[in-house]
């Protein structure tokens, strides 16, 4: 289980951009929080789960879980649920379990699944006196944190060549060239072919070559079944 994994194929350029983007985002967030706290009477904290969010939005910005609505909506939902559980359930272990479970359930319903949000729910219930003293104001703190990271993700990611944030469900530019070209029978694809193809994509695609192979094999089997169900000279049922 602990053997070295190949991981997701990532270009060196993408790694550098991801690291720089995360650095700038966290620096700007902490600077903003410090300025607001020092110049007003508000108690604003840097929510630790924003570190995981920063990793997602800058390392895998094309992931469905890193998009604006899952990112912002997930954190806000988790904050609301976490504060409610902290106030209404006296036993901490029960409160945090309910907070995380209800936050995940709500994210499924609202289609805003964002894994770092579970950390926000946990912080709301186990964050100690400083967090509990905020009460429902903790939701405002999370909104400032998540909103800042979101604005920086929109700005920085769209300055990086090849990145599109938020992700629009469109094909790679190569798609039009591919469908306009006459192709003969496709050769059998190997795992290395998928690895090479991943390297040609702009940005990081949050999927392994093994998963791509499995998806391709299922798609081929489905296409064969569909073709077998079509009568000679007929149309698909």
Image (cartoon, rainbow, N blue to C red):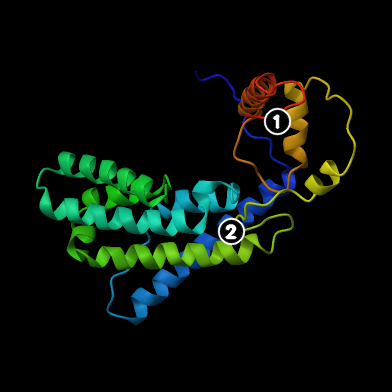
Q: Is residue 236 above or below residue 93?
A: above
Left or right, residue 12 beside residue 152:
right
Distance from Cα at disc 1 to Cα at disc 2:
38 Å
Q: Nearer the viewer, mark 1 or mark 2?
A: 1
Image point (82%, 42%), residue name: 179
Image point (32%, 68%), residue name: 44
- Position in image of residue 45 (x %, y %): 33, 64
Judging depth in this view, the residue of 9 and 176 nearest the camera is: 176
Q: Is residue 209 above or below residue 43?
A: above
- Position in image of residue 129 (x %, y %): 18, 57
- Position in image of residue 23 (x %, y %): 57, 57
Left or right, residue 235 beside residue 19:
right
Of the image marks 1 and 2, the number of the one nearer the N terminus: 2
* Disc assigned to residue 22: none
Q: Quadrant of residue 229?
A: top right
Residue 55 in sight from this viewpoint: no
* Whether label 1 touches label 2, CB < 8 Å: no
SS category of the residue bearing label 2: loop
- Position in image of residue 69 (x %, y %): 46, 58
Which residue carries the number 1 mark?
235
SS category of the residue bearing label 1: loop
Q: Residues within 10 Å of mark 2 (few under 14, many from 20)?
A: some
Left or right, residue 67 beside residue 201:
left
* Disc assigned to residue 166: 2
State the quadrant of the C terminus: top right
Residue 146 in sight from this viewpoint: yes
Image point (79%, 19%), residue name: 188
Left or right, residue 226 beside residue 123:
right
């Amino acid at each position: 289980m602990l053997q070295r994994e190949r991981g997701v194929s990532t270009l060196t350029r993408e790694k550098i951009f991801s690291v720089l983007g995360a650095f700038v985002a966290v620096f700007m967030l902490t600077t903003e929080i410090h300025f607001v706290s020092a110049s007003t009477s508000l108690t604003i904290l840097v929510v630790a789960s924003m570190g995981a969010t920063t990793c997602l939005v800058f390392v895998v910005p094309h992931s469905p879980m890193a998009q604006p609505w899952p990112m912002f909506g997930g954190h806000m939902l988790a904050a609301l649920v976490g504060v409610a559980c902290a106030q209404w359930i006296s036993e901490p272990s029960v409160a945090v379990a309910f907070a995380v479970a209800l936050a995940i359930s709500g994210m499924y319903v609202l289609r805003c699944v964002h894994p770092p949000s579970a950390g926000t729910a946990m912080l709301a219930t186990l964050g100690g006196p400083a967090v509990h003293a905020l009460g429902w104001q903790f939701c405002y703190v999370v909104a400032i944190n998540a909103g800042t990271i979101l604005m920086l993700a929109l700005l920085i990611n769209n300055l990086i060549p090849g990145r599109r944030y938020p992700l629009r469900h469109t094909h790679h530019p190569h798609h039009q060239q591919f469908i306009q070209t006459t192709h003969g029978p496709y050769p059998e694809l190997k795992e290395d072919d998928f690895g090479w193809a991943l390297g040609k994509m702009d940005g990081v695609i949050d999927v392994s070559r093994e998963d791509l192979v499995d998806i391709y094999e299922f798609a081929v089997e489905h296409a064969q079944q569909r073709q077998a169900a079509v009568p000679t000279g007929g149309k698909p049922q």
